Image (cartoon, helix red, strand yellow):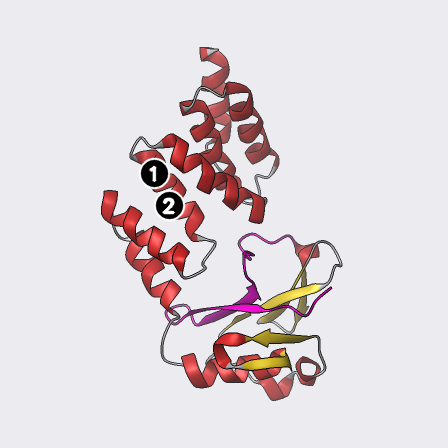
Amino acid sequence: MARPVLYINRDLEYDWLIAVEFGRVVDGQPDDHIRRVGDDFAYVLHGPDGEVVGFALGGLTAFDVDAHPELWQGPNFDAPLFGLRDVPAAAVVLAARARLGRESTTNRVIFQLAANAEGEEAVGLWRQCLETGDSMAHYGLGYTLLALGRAREAYGHLREYVECCPWNGWAWCWLGRAHETLGELTDARAAYERAIALEAEETNAPELLTALREES
């Protein structure tokens, strides 16, 4: 597997750093897709026990890199945002602290603005967030478009999100609603059933599935 090229995602408010390959998200990653190093750091894997594709870190400001010497030992990454090539996670963490210790990355600034906006303003902001490379924005754009009655557009973004994050039950619920609005009832049922099967978090998929069965 080629050396991962990291997309840097930093949120100052929550003080986390996510550095994974472009197009990936860490939302709801199963336990067998991560390898923990201490309490605050975890490598993200490509499937159960797979190759490392990045990492996530909580508490960037106070994280003690020296307390985890294994982070200097590989695997190595490229981090174009910092002008780094073939470096271990520890080097990326230190660069992020130096460059982003007191600010969020642009994608997160736009993400928060979009999450607090409504209607067409939110659509525009979600699109800008996507243009920064943040795949999580597919989810926000999808449910926003669906609420505006633009189910066909919404479907593409929700489908994209469940492809890169198939463990998010709420994303499957929204995808099911898009299918249902488009009259694709078999696909809607499958999406709701998938959400129910994933319910580590409670969703309204059971109610949506029951209503759909009663109507059809």
The picture places residue 123, in percent across and down from the top left corner, at 30, 46
Q: What span is in magenta?
A: 1-30
**Is residue 2 a member of the stretch shown in magenta?**
yes
Q: Quadrant of residue 154?
A: top left
Per the image, the residue denoted by label 1 is 145
Please tell me which residue is depicted at 33% across the width and 41% down the height of the picture: 144
Residue 165 visible in the picture: no
**Is residue 21 a member of the stretch shown in magenta?**
yes
Q: Quadrant of residue 105?
A: bottom left
Residue at the extreme bottom of the image, as rendered: 66
Please tell me which residue is depicted at 38% across the width and 40% down the height of the picture: 143
Please tell me which residue is depicted at 61% across the width and 82% down the height of the picture: 90
Badge 2 element: helix
Residue 85 visible in the picture: yes
Quadrant of the image containing the N terminus: bottom right
Q: Nearer the viewer, residue 214 or 181?
A: 181
